[in-house]
Amino acid sequence: VFGENHLVQLISLQNADGSWCLDENLAGILGKSLEDLQAAVPVKDASSLSWATVLAVVWLHSNAMQMKGEWELLEKKARDWIHIHA
C-alpha cells in the first residue's frame, strides 16, 4: 500500500498502545529475516513486543532523522510503552 516508503510503512505498523509487533512486515522494513530478529533478542525472556518496539525506535533514529518532526510523537509513545512494559 505504501510502496517503498519505509517510514510510512513503519508508522502504519505501530499499535495503538505505542508498541510494534515482531512480524514479517517489521522484519521487511528492517531488512532482516524474522528468524534473525527472533534469534537476536538480547534477553531471552523479553517480550517480542518489547524487542520489536526497541528495533523500530532504533530504525527511526538510524534511517529517518531528517523527518524527525513526522515521528517524534509516536517515538515518545513507544518510549513510554517501553518504560512500562520492559
Image: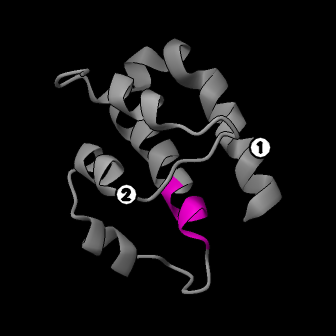
Spot the residue most to the front.
Answer: 1
Tell me the quadrant of the picture where the C terminus can be found.
bottom right
In-image side of 51 versus 31 (left or right): right
Residue located 20% across and 51% down the image: 31
Spot the residue most to the right.
Answer: 84
Callout 2 secondary element: loop
Check disc 1 and give the amino acid type: Asp
Q: Nearest to the eye among marks 1 and 2: give it.
A: 2
**SS majority, magenta:** helix
Q: Compared to 22, does 66 lie above or below?
A: above
In-image side of 71 versus 34 (left or right): right
Check disc 2 and give the amino acid type: Asp
Q: Compared to 50, does 8 lie above or below?
A: above
Callout 1 secondary element: helix
- Which range of residues does the magenta coloring cover? 47-52
Q: Are marks 1 and 2 in contact (CB under 8 Å)?
A: no
Q: Which residue is mark 2?
A: 23
